[in-house]
Amino acid sequence: MIAAFTITPSFYLILAAILFSIGAVGLLVRRNVIVMFMCVELMLNAVNLTFVSFAKALNDVGGQVLVFFTLVVAAAEVAVGLGIIVAIFRRRRDATADDLRTLEG
Amino acid sequence: MNPHVDFHAFAPEIVLTVTIVAVLIADLFTDDSKLPARIAALGVLGSLVPVLTLAVDGQTRSLFGGAFVVDPFSLVLTGFFLVAGYVTLLLSFDYIGEGDYYQGEFYVLLLTSLLGMIVISSARDLISIFVALETITIPTFVLAGWRKHDTKSNEASLKYFLIGVLSSAVMLYGMSLVFGLANSTVLVDIHKYASGHTPALFAVAVFLTLVGFAFKVSAVPFHFWAPDTYEGAPTPVTAFLSVASKAGGFVALLTIVRLGFFPSGNSWQPILWVLAAASMTLGNLAALRQTNIVRMLAYSSIAQGGFILVPLAVAGDVRGNAAWQAVVIYILIYGAMNLGAFAAVIAAARRTRSAEISRLAGFGRTNPAIAVMFSVFLFSLAGIPPLAGWFAKFVMFRAVFDANTTVAVVLGVIAAVNSVIAFFYYSGVVRRLWFDEPAAGVELSSPRLPVGLSAAMGLMTAVILVVGVYPQFFARLGEIAFQRG
């Protein structure tokens, strides 16, 4: 039974799509800035998983190289994002997106 | 194997990178606050030199397996970005110098963002486009929150950041699917793949990629961050965001559609059509009821973004390069007039100490020089001849008529109606400047304008008048951009 069940690249792609959706929904639903931030990371990692599984399926190492670019960009975003959150924490004690309504679009 | 690297091809990028390092070091070792600013300005002008030598050389150079191409298109836009960056520096000198925040970092971040822009005009591969786009965006998150003790600036920065990373993630997910289907990230290969029969997943991938770009260029319905961020950020940064950073997004969008997705017209044309129509209409309607001049210009820039999307949306039915030329010409003219408008806002705010439109009443009597230039920028944005804005609108409508399909004509009609709506709010500000009585208790006199600000306004006025009267100048640039090198 178990032996007949082979894991194909599409399993990873579907997993990545699910992770991406969880991240996207979380970003839209959650109000805590730090959690929103983690949701973005989840989305970026879903992208990495997609790149790696395509690279494996296509037998193209290029896709795995692209992951490094994504990781570097994500790290830069984390550094800047945490900096902004710290700047806001210094002025107020909490960090929920709902409190930030001085500017009303 | 020792790969041959053509250093001349990316000399502008090298000069700018060296400048960034020099500004950082100068800021570290001197107390002279003017020095970093001077180095930054010199470096930006210095980067224009290799752009000129490459233009004289006129050869198309392709590097890194076709991921980085220097052709007339990239040179025209690199030149545009460097000039726009220089004008932003002119706007910033005194604004930044008068605050009590660190200055060196401001210039470093601004130049880093500028570096991303000049890379993006040469990028011809999904990943180099993505990395360049992030190089543009990440420093601007910090710049938007640069007044870090100001709640508004914090909020502007956080909103911009969350939307920015969300859009990057969505775009990158789209790109990863494109890579999986086309088995390459180089646009030339994607073009080949899109010419054949493509599965439905390709349309999904294109959709996600374009949604990411829609956030970057603040197209409706992905625009809601723009007015808040523009209002909260320091005004020179807002000018930079609304012109250079937005143009960066449009350049990447143009490159990716023209060289990558083009053959698969059904997947991208409807999306761009909807984005263009929605941006023009909602941007203009929202601008009508703004009382703050920066927010009004924010919505106006969303609407102008819609006008830039019009030729892109009909490009599939236009023979030759007319649609692409229209986009490039519109970007160049939009850059001049929007930078000018923000320069005038900064100049006016130095006198009125406010961004409320009502406080501008009677400004024309007390400060005629600023008011004249302000009116020139606003009328140009409205598209009134003989100011440059009319030519931008003209090339846009010409692309629509060249396409000559039902959907294109409907879009053209929407654009025409919107040009009329836009006239109302631009002329409303001009009316206040000249015909209203100054409000009681508003002190409009103040020390002289800084040289940099006056120079920026004068330069932009000159460009708008020259191009308005002699549009062949920018039309020729548009033609050159799409010549085979």
Image (spheres, coloured by chain):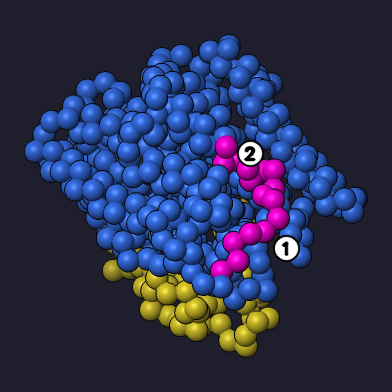
Q: Residue B218 location, x and y as percent?
A: 39, 55
- Compared to residue B85, the image places residue A80 above or below, namely below
Residue position marked by numbered label 2 in the rendering: B455
Q: In this rendering, which labeled residue sits more in front, label 1 or label 2?
A: 2
Residue B384 is one of the magenta-drawn residues: no
Three-letter residue code for mark 2:
Ala
Residue at mark 2: chain: B
User: What colour do you see for chain B?
Assistant: blue
* Quarter location, residue B220: bottom left
- Name the mark on residue A12: none
- Compared to residue B117, the image places residue B172 above or below, namely below
Q: Residue B133 location, x and y as percent?
A: 51, 46
Three-letter residue code for mark 1:
Gly
Q: Residue B270 location, x and y as percent?
A: 20, 46
Query: Residues at marks 1 and 2, common chain?
Result: yes
Measuring 68% from the left and 56% from the top, which residue is drawn there? B95
Can residue B476 be seen here?
yes
Can residue B177 be seen here?
no
Span shown in magenta: B442-458
